[in-house]
Image: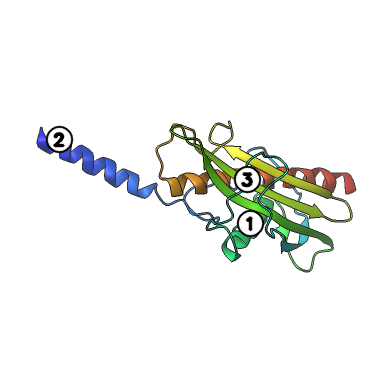
Amino acid sequence: MKNLILLCIISIFACSCRSLYYGYLPGTNYKLLKPITELDLQGRTFNIEFKDNRGSSNRITCSEHTLNRKTELEGELGMRYFRESIITMIQNSNGKVSGDAADKLTIELEALSFRLTGAGFIVAHGFVQFKVSSPYLQESYCADMTDHDQDAPLKWYSLVTRKTGTRLIVSGSMRRTAENFVRDLAELSAARL
C-alpha cells in the first residue's frame, strides 16, 4: 500500500512539473495567442510602431479596480510581451508585420497588469488597455478578465500557483484585446480592398 501511495505521489509530481511552465511570450507550451474565432487579414502587411504610454496611471477605463504597478510586467518585459503578443496575433490571422509596409499603425500600451482580489475566495484579474491610431482606425481596447469569464484560460477552481495564475489571466486578457483589435483590422482591411 505504501508503494502504491508513493507511486501515485511521484506520478502526480512528474505530470504536474511539465505543465507548470507558463511564460508570457509566444512559443511556450500554452498556446494562448491563437484567435478563438477565425480571422483572416488576407496576407496584408502592416507597419506598426509600438509606444509605451503607461506613465503612472493606476486605472483603466473598463474596470473599477486599481492596477498593481509593482509587477514583473513593468518596464521592458511588459512592453516586449505586449509587442510580441500583437505581432503573434496578426501572424496567426494570416497577416504580416514589416517596417516597410504602407499600412502604418501606432499602438500605445496604456496598461498591463494583474491583481488578486478578495479574501478567502480569491479572484484573479488581468488588465490590458491600449490605443490604436492610424488613418483608418482610431480605437481603444480594454479588458479586465477574471477567472470567472467564459474565455479565461483558467477557472476559479483551477489548481495553479499565484505566479502561474496571474500570468495566465494576463495572457488571456491580452489575447482577448489583441483578437478584438485584429478583428477590427480584418473588417477594415476587407472594406478598403
Residue 95 appearing in the image: yes
Q: Which residue is mark 1?
A: 82
The 10 Å Cα crowd at callout 3, few under 14, some 14 to 19, many 20 or more, is: some
> Does 185 sit left or right of 37 as displayed?
right
The 10 Å Cα crowd at callout 1, few under 14, some 14 to 19, many 20 or more, is: many
Amino acid at the residue labelled 3: Thr
**Looking at the image, is mark 3 or mark 1 earlier in the sequence?**
3
Q: Give me the residue at 68% from left, 47% from top.
A: 59
Q: Give me the residue at 66% from left, 51% from top.
A: 58
Amino acid at the residue labelled 2: Leu
Q: Give me the residue at 65% from left, 48% from top.
A: 128
Q: What's the distance in space between the residues labelled 3 and 1, CA to CA?
A: 20 Å
Residue 188 — which label?
Answer: none
Asked which secondary structure carries label 3, the reply is loop
Place of residue 8 in the rendered image (x, y in percent of width and height, measured from the top left): 21, 37
**Looking at the image, is mark 2 or mark 1 earlier in the sequence?**
2
Place of residue 137 in the rendered image (x, y in percent of width and height, measured from the top left): 84, 50
For discs 2 and 3, the disc positioned in front in the rendered view: 3
For discs 2 and 1, the disc positioned in front in the rendered view: 1
